[in-house]
Image (cartoon, rainbow, N blue to C red):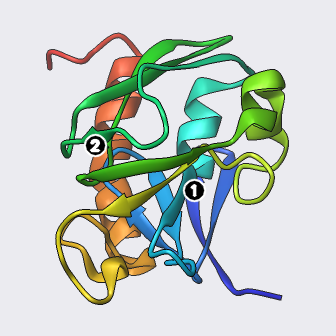
Amino acid sequence: MNSTLTFAMGDYQAEFPTDRRFVANHMWATGPDEDGSLRFGLTAYAVRLLQDVYFLDWTFQPGQAVKHRAEIGSIESKKAESDLYAPIAGVMSVINDAVLDDPSQINADCYGNGWLFEMRPSDGRIDSMESDHLMSPDEYLAHLEKAWEVAQRTIKGQANL
């Protein structure tokens, strides 16, 4: 069993496997696999804020190069509609078609069958998991502390305070 870290979101406990890296836009990454691709999905934090994902759409195709932070798709849920942005620069290699057909897999298994896509990084690093845009689990938890403060104000309608 992989170890996890936990972040308290009010009464909800979001868990994060320590066997992967994380991105500021609340995605996780595993890999690289044999062709150098990293697999990405949404973290438990993002899934909790979205709640009940029911639609996912991509604006890229496998084989297409994307820049870091380029819009790559959108996601709709019970709570929000959000654009999705590339977590790193690279070439998109695989889309999880099963999640396109049934986005509820993101809710049910965000760290397993609910993964979103794979991409090959273009930063030229031998160990692509050391990208400047990927955080360790501890770095991600520190990032969440700041993000949660903003999220709570937004949820309470006090974003401008």
**Residue 76 % position (x, y):** 59, 13
Left or right of residue 29: residue 13: right
Could you give the CA–CA distance between mark 1 and mark 2, rounded to whole angstroms? 36 Å
Give the residue pinned by disc 1: 8
**Residue 68 % position (x, y):** 20, 46
Residue 111 versus residue 60: which sits nearer the camera? Answer: 60
Mark closer to the chain start, 1 or 2: 1
Q: Which mark is residue 65?
A: 2
Amino acid at the residue labelled 2: Ala
Is residue 26 among the parts visible in the rendering?
A: yes
Q: Which mark is residue 89?
A: none
Residue 44 versus residue 121: which sits nearer the camera? Answer: 121
The quadrant the C terminus occupies is: top left
Look at the numbered disc 2 and give the secondary structure of its residue.
strand
Query: Residue 142 occupies which quadrant of the picture?
Result: bottom left
Left or right of residue 156: residue 102: right
| Above or below: residue 32 compared with residue 25 | below
Look at the numbered disc 1 and give the secondary structure of its residue.
strand
Is disc 2 surrounded by few (<14), some (14 to 19) or many (20+) residues within 10 Å? some
Left or right of residue 138: residue 50: right
Is residue 9 among the parts visible in the rendering?
A: no
**Residue that appears at 74% across and 46% down:** 114
Amino acid at the residue labelled 1: Ala
**Residue that appears at 63% across and 37% down:** 47
**Residue that appears at 57% across and 50% down:** 41
Is disc 1 surrounded by few (<14), some (14 to 19) or many (20+) residues within 10 Å? few
Query: Residue 97 occupies which quadrant of the picture?
Result: top right
